Image (cartoon, grey):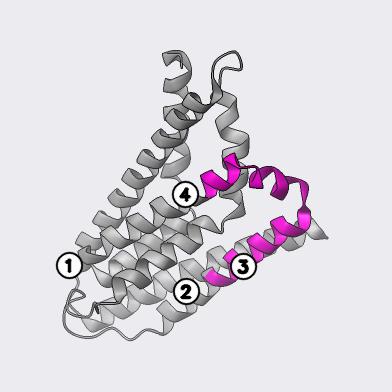
Amino acid sequence: MNIESFIPFVLATILILIIPGPTIILVISQAVVHGRKSVVPLVVGVLLGDFTAMTFSLLGLGAILSASAFLFSVFKWIGALYLLYLGVQLWKSKPKKHSAQDSVKKNSARSLLLSSFIVTALNPKSIAFFVAFLPQFIHPLKPVLPQLTLLGGTFLFLAVLNAALYAIFAGQLSEQIRKERVRKWFNRCGGGALIGAGIIIITAGLQRSS
């Protein structure tokens, strides 16, 4: 792949990833609540979710979703409803007076990983994005597989780095929060953000279908 094509791809990917979407909103919300110990499972979930969406795209599922409005809607509604569920749970959670690290249970890492994976993998925009975005930087006269491997690997690396930076920042912020009232405020802000993201996705879908 030419460096003239690779550099614009990296720059475009960075700009796209910096803008917080449902996945980053989830990462920030959970990292603020659970602290630095949540960074690794959240980031791993994002990596697996993006890898799953990319794999489905390369296998042709993205083309199927693009051609089938019904399947696209199914993925969209599942993802939106899951965001609403996570938002409500976070809003209702009652913070304890001790630090967030003490409140993390052994099974919390699995739960955090699963939540970030589901939100990332079930976002139909991710699958459609890979189908529409990656081919723009592929040279048609050169072997496609090595180019897709390089572009896909680069995207996954940048996505993981982006999610990790957001999670680390939010986790550091969490370590400085000690008052129960402040933690409750953060829980409600994070839960409200997740609920808002789910409502936006549902509203956009209803407008398209009308």
Q: Position of residue 109 (x, y in %)?
A: 30, 69
Q: Residue at x 77, y 54 (%)?
A: 69
Image label count: 4
> Gap in Å between the C-alphas at discs 2 and 3?
12 Å
Q: Earlier in the sequence, mark 3 or mark 1?
A: 3
Amino acid of disc 4:
Asp
Which mark identifies residue 50?
A: 4
Per the image, label 3 sits on a secondary structure element best described as helix
Mark 1 is surrounded, within 10 Å at the Cα level, by few (under 14), some (14 to 19) or many (20 or more) other residues, namely: some
Q: Earlier in the sequence, mark 4 or mark 1?
A: 4
Amino acid of disc 1:
Glu
Which residue in the structure is indicated by mark 3?
78
Which mark identifies residue 96?
A: none
Circles 2 and 3 in contact, beta carbons < 8 Å: no
Q: Is residue 162 magenta?
A: no
* Closer to viewer: mark 3 or mark 1: 3
Per the image, label 2 sits on a secondary structure element best described as helix
Q: Position of residue 97 (x, y in %)?
A: 19, 85
Amino acid of disc 3:
Ile
Q: Earlier in the sequence, mark 2 or mark 1?
A: 2
Q: Is residue 79 magenta?
A: yes
Which residue in the structure is indicated by mark 1?
175
Q: Residue at x 24, y 77 (%)?
A: 106
Which mark identifies residue 86?
A: 2
